Image (cartoon, rainbow, N blue to C red):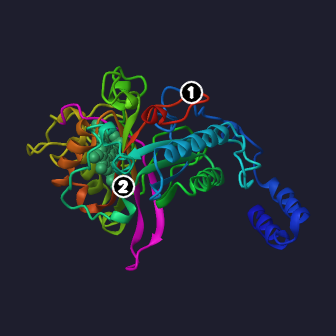
Amino acid sequence: GLLGAAGAAGLVLGGAGGAGVAAAVADSSGGGPALTSLGSTAVPFHGARQAGITTPPQARTVLAAYDLEPGADRAKTAALLRRWSDAAARMSRGGRADADDQVALDAGPSSLTVTFAFGSALFDKLGMADRRPAALQPLPAFPGEELDAARSDGDLLVQVCADDALVGFHALRTLHKLARGTARPRWRMAGFARSPGATAAPMTHRNLMGQVDGTKNPRPGDADFEAKLFIAPTADPVWARGGSYVVVRRIRMLLDSWDGLDVPAQERVIGRRKDTGAPLTGGAERTEPDYGRRNGDGTPVIAANAHIRVTAPEFNRGAAMLRRGYSYDDGFRPDGTADAGLLFVAWQADPRDGFVPVQQKLARGDALSPFIRHETSGLFVAPPGCAPGGYVGQGLFE
Ligand code: HEM
């Protein structure tokens, strides 16, 4: 097939220098469409909000956390954020950053977004504890979690998203090089969602358990959308206004146990149909669940411990968050089970009214809990966006 031919050409010509590489590119270019809107789409880096929060999820993500080097002070950290913002702005337009390695040379921006956020420890290391938002407290311990400290937290979070894996790799690699001397890598995780164009019409993603996931997320049309996601214009500290808090949790799925359930049992775990994502009380994906409906024997149709009943805002004093997670697949664990699951990424105006109370309830044992393990955790505050000429986080350092 086409792929096989292109692969073979690449193999033969790969080591043959400039001309050979060009020939390989030409040979393999017949296999698919040329630059489409998928590649040419640019998401502006600058604006009142950072990109990558309400941006529709791209096909790929790379999340990375960095810790400040021992000698990094406020000035060095601010300078890094300026370098990062400048490079992110240029790459988001499809331009090149300084000392570009040309990895993404041929590609369009592919909806690249780069989003920066700060962890709690950053404020201590920079002697700025008085500027730390009160909501950036360490998350409480939750029953059942098995957290790996080395892959949790961090001083600086970088979220790269793009519709092309090479573009995403290049963006993080560029930022990584710009961090040298100021911040060192702490952890990195890569995730994927569905590629645009893979379904006949755009639709809600499915996660690795096969569920339609994201149905009841806050939507840009909701009256209180901004208030749920972004730090209020009256909140303190002033520099964080218009920013957002993000919870990042690597949640492994126990896929072998999950696959042992038949589909009706899997549907009771969530409270929704697996094929359409519709609530078990009927209708289509967007039909409101009827939590009062009972079966003939008096039991609720959507079980008391169904994931959607436990997490729904109406049963959590309005607690809401934008879940913008990605699937991950990191191969096999030593025992042969899948090292795969959900890179849970949830944005909210205040985690104390969002993730924390909902996860406290979930961890007491919703029907999904036996099939997942929370392996890592992080809470970060994303500053508001910046204007051209400025940089993300500038308000903190001025
Ligand atoms: C809803 C899956 C973890 C919060 C859902 C839905 C699915 C799902 C399939 C229904 C469709 C939808 O509305 O998106 C999962 C899986 C998880 C996971 C597979 C772990 C691997 C979490 C966690 C939280 C959470 C850790 C927050 C602490 C929510 C919320 C809803 C939801 C708020 C919407 C509830 C509603 O308003 O109906 N989840 N979830 N989920 N989940 Fe999860």
The answer to whether residue 227 is magenta is no
Q: What residue type is labelled 1?
A: Ala
Q: Identify the residue at image location x=38%, y=35%.
A: 244
In 3D space, how far apart are the residues under numbered discs 1 and 2 (Cα atoms)? 28 Å
**Image position, residue 105 (x, y; %):** 76, 49
Q: Does the residue labelled 2 lie within 8 Å of ligand 1?
A: no
Please say if 222 is above or below 206: above
Which residue position is annotated with label 1?
387
Which element carries disc 2, helix, strand or loop? Answer: loop
Residue 279, visible in the rendered structure: no
**Image position, residue 352 (x, y; %):** 23, 39
**Image position, residue 398 (x, y; %):** 46, 32
Which residue position is annotated with label 2?
153
Which element carries disc 1, helix, strand or loop? Answer: loop
Q: Earlier in the sequence, mark 1 or mark 2?
A: 2
Magenta-drawn segment:
316-342
Residue 223, visible in the rendered structure: yes
The answer to whether residue 340 is magenta is yes
How many C-alpha atoms fall within 10 Å of the one at disc 2: few (<14), some, or many (≥20)?
Answer: many
Farthest residue in the top direction?
223
Q: What residue type is labelled 2?
A: Asp
Q: Ligand 1, what quadrant?
A: top left
**Image position, residue 141 (x, y; %):** 21, 56
